[in-house]
Image (cartoon, grey):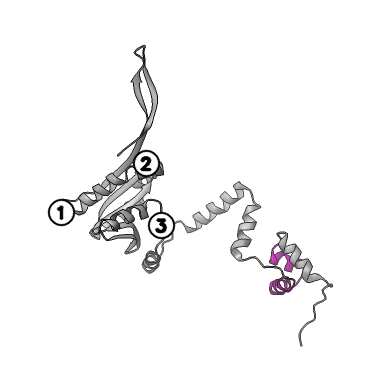
Amino acid sequence: MPIKLNLPDGINSTFSQLHAAGQSVQSIAAEYNISRDTVARRIALAGGIVRTRKEANFLRMSKTTKEYRQQITKAAHDAARGSKYTHERHLKMASKGRQIGFGEMEIVDVFSKSGYLAECQKPCGKYNIDVAIGAVAVEVIGATVGRLKDSTFIERAEYLRNCGYTLILISFKRREQFIGNLDDIVAFIKRSCGLPSAVRKDWVIRCRSERFSRVRNNLGQLAVVKVPERFFN
């Protein structure tokens, strides 16, 4: 025989209003000494919408201080530090691919129009190559040049080399610098693709630009004047 809950009239609407105001289903259940499922069901009966776990976490974190968020993030990193994913999990993650970053599709589009087979986010063992063109692996690292010294990145680079890939890394501080140097980047990659594997080398292409030029004024003094942006690498 079902247990009859001793709840006041209009409680469904009350639960829905409390939840809409930001109170969690769990805290409402604890306050009224009933199950979480009961609260969720009554919120739904009142026409309310129960937040998903992701939405609930977002709301909870939005009410915390920056210091608290940094504290719990550090705790999560400390807990994960030293643990390693299994080889099978790495392969599964690579096969699913990851989010495509800026610069990757731009390279793929140019090479595809030139008749080359360029693959974005191509799985290679436990890793994903940003752009794979034949035996050349192009990695768009943006402004994170310090990543080149990171042990994880070094391990990744060695793995790709052992798989037969030649690495070309592209760095830039601003997106405009990448776009402005894209023709040179593509030409360099094509030259590398055309070389025998025995003579290929790994390269870092640093995309830069200038907006000012040094000149001498009427007094013979050095001065800086603004000029159209010039791109170089």
Tell me the magenta residue range: 22-45
N-terminal of the pair, mark 2 or mark 3, is 3
Of marks 2 and 1, the one in the foreground? 2
- Relative placement, left or right, of 176 versus 56 is left
Determine the secondary structure under disc 3.
loop
Residue bearing mark 2: 177
Amino acid type, callout 1:
Ala
- Relative placement, left or right, of 41 versus 4 is left
Mark number for residue 198? 1
Neighbourhood count class around disc 3 (C-alpha, 10 Å): few under 14, some 14–19, many 20 upward: few
N-terminal of the pair, mark 2 or mark 1, is 2
- Residue 130: image x %, image y %? 34, 56
- Relative placement, left or right, of 107 versus 72 is left
Determine the secondary structure under disc 2.
helix
Amino acid type, callout 3:
Ile
Image height of 180 relative to 47, above or below: above
Query: Alpha-carbon distance for marks 2 and 1?
Result: 31 Å
